[in-house]
Image: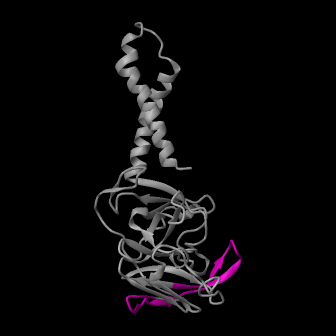
Amino acid sequence: MNFALFLFGLLVITGIAWSADTFWFRRRRPVGGKDPWWVEYSASFFPVILVVFLLRSFLFEPFKIPSGSMIPTLLIGDFILVNKFTYGIRLPILNKKIIEINTPQRGDVMVFRWPEDPSLDYIKRVVGLPGDRIVYENKRLSVNGLEVTQKQMDDYLSRERMQFSKRFTENLDGREHTILVDQDAPAIHSYPYTPSFPHAENCKYSATGVQCTVPAGHYFMMGDNRDNSSDSRVWGFVPEANIVGQAFFIWLNLNELGRFGTFR
């Protein structure tokens, strides 16, 4: 369900009911007459829905992490906040940018509409910007011919899968984050892989990985849990029009209360 559209529908319905009573029906009601039930409900809910709609559309939107593709940065069950204005002000529902502010940078954790089904929201890390040459081969990432530096850490134990993964800190443009790598997993699942996404001609696949040139107006996204993430290596580039916002804050995890505020 498109919650933004549902919220907008409630806003319109309660707003019309409230306005009709304020400017028409109230003037014709007997003095001291009781407000009808639909007026009471509309008067109560309209300002609340208006505030929620404006906050959610232009400032911050909450999301829940449903999968482990961003482990160890984000865990299943994390409730996060997404900054809706940092990449520009967009019209609600239409998601059309009307005011330019910033653009995504390498290393940002970004929420976007999944290109294969825009009704679904995905969250991944920005790895490639428009025009970048991305190479991911033999579990190592290179951007524009420069290999992204890594430093190995202690192994990570996944409580969901009860197995260890190799853990590294990765540095993208001076911004460090942690990734997981399973050395026994294939570089590209189901290789040989025949891509069918838009601009698939920009990518070349092999048994060791993939090389892609990011087209204009698009971004290359990858999960921090590199071998357990369906991302741009599989379904292609994210158009600028699909951007929702930048994730920046964990505000709740019912399984780990100590994660509050630990994201950034």
Give the percent coordinates (x, y) of residue 90: 35, 55
Task: Answer whether residue 219 is visible to the viewer in this image.
Answer: yes
Q: Which residue is at a point 40% across and 52% down the rendered structure image?
A: 94
- Give the extent of the magenta segment: 142-168
Would you say residue 221 sits in the magenta stretch? Answer: no
Query: Left of 167 or right of it: where is 44?
Result: left
Q: Which residue is at a point 50% across and 27% down the rendered structure image?
A: 41
Q: How is the image coloured?
A: one colour
Quarter that holds the C terminus? bottom left
Residue 245, compared with residue 68, is above or below; it is above
Q: Nearer the viewer, residue 113 or 224?
A: 113
Task: Answer whether residue 244 is visible to the viewer in this image.
Answer: no
Give the percent coordinates (x, y) of residue 137: 52, 91
Q: Nearer the viewer, residue 152 or 216?
A: 216
Q: How many marks?
A: 0
Would you say residue 144 sits in the magenta stretch? Answer: yes
Residue 234, compared with residue 49, is above or below; it is below
Outermost residue toward the right in this view: 162
Query: Left of 84 or right of it: where is 221?
Result: right
Residue 176, compared with residue 117, is above or below; it is below
Give the percent coordinates (x, y) of residue 208: 57, 92
| Image-quadrant location for residue 146 | bottom left
| Image-quadrant location for residue 23 | top left
Q: Which residue is at a point 39% across and 66% down the rendered structure image?
A: 240
